[in-house]
Image (tube, helix red, strand yellow):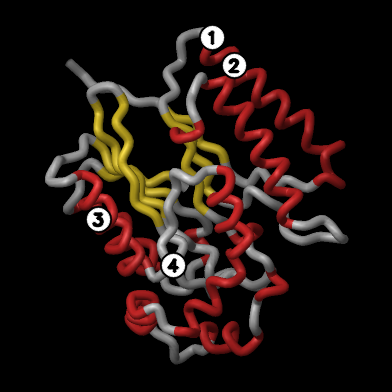
Amino acid sequence: MTKTLGWVHLSDLHFLSRKSWRDSKVLTDLLIDLQKQVDSGARVDLVFCTGDISFGTFQGETLTSQYEDAKEYLAKVLDACHLPSERLFLVPGNHDTDRTKVSESITEYFRNQSRTLEQVNQLLYEGKPDVQRAMERLQQYREFLKTSFPHIHLDQNGVFGAIVSIKDLIVTITGLNSAWSCVDDKDKDKIWLGGATQMASAQKAIDVALNGGKPHLRIALLSSQKYMRQKDDGRMIERARDFQPTLEVVR
């Protein structure tokens, strides 16, 4: 018998109260359509949101208030799908960073033309101070997940690995953090993922949760791949399919 799985993929919601007059109709119509699809028999087992949940600090509006709006809306999405909050998984995008926490010296360090992908992966693996300072820009995002979606356990680099059992299917979810080196509107071709280290870290958490079991499907969540400084940083995820044919990338 063929095993099936369905999911809803959201991205770039950009919650911002001062623009609600523009965005509310689109978001409301999405909920109405989603409800119709589910009522008509569409199968939804998971909900993914791949970055830019918030707009970012803008003219006095805080990330915290934007995340509160996002939490309320995502609860409606889950309700329309008849799913508990544990079936929702998120990864950050460049707008989910607190740009007041971006250090000029750290930006210069990672944008230096001499920096290599191997160096960045090693820095993430060792948890060097420069990396941890860069991660501070995602502290409010981390707090948002901790209070609203505590089933998503981020490691020191903002990465997670999880498993979900859906009827007779075992699914693994790898959440990657492409936002940790995002700075400004000049990010194109300048951001780092550190994909090899992030994938290894997530897989370690997944292996512990599987306890020797084998998944039917592996899903990786990622934002902003097109802005990466070295395309191989993101392509390594695609190449992972050579060894994990059940890997699906959602971005």
How far apart are labels 2 and 3 at the CA level? 35 Å
How far apart are labels 3 and 1 at the CA level? 36 Å
Which residue has dot 3 on it?
240
Q: Which residue lies at the image location 59% right of the left edge and 83% below the top edge?
A: 107
Residue found at the far top of this picture: 40
| Amino acid type of the residue that numbered disc 2 sits on in the rendered structure | Gln
Assess whether mark 1 and mark 4 are in contact (beta carbons under 8 angstroms).
no
Residue 234, placed above or below residue 7: below
Q: Which residue lies at the image location 50% right of the left edge and 33% below the top edge?
A: 85
| Amino acid type of the residue that numbered disc 3 sits on in the rendered structure | Ala
Assess whether mark 2 and mark 4 are in contact (beta carbons under 8 angstroms).
no
Q: Is residue 227 left or right of residue 95?
A: left
Dot label at residue 39: 1
Compare marks 2 and 3 and give the one earlier in the sequence.
2
User: Marks 4 and 1: which is nearer the front?
Assistant: 4
How far apart are labels 4 and 2 at the CA level? 36 Å
Q: Secondary structure at mark 3?
A: helix
Assess whether mark 1 and mark 2 are in contact (beta carbons under 8 angstroms).
yes
Q: Secondary structure at mark 4?
A: loop
Q: Secondary structure at mark 2?
A: helix
Residue found at the far left of this picture: 212
Dot label at residue 157: 4
Compare marks 3 and 1 and give the one earlier in the sequence.
1
Q: Secondary structure at mark 1?
A: helix
Crowding at mark 1 (Cα within 10 Å: few <14, some 14-19, many 20+)? few
Compare marks 3 and 4 and give the one earlier in the sequence.
4
Residue 174, placed above or below residue 88: below
Q: Which residue lies at the image location 44% right of the left edge and 87% below the top edge?
A: 115
The percent coordinates of residue 114 (x first, y second) are 44, 91
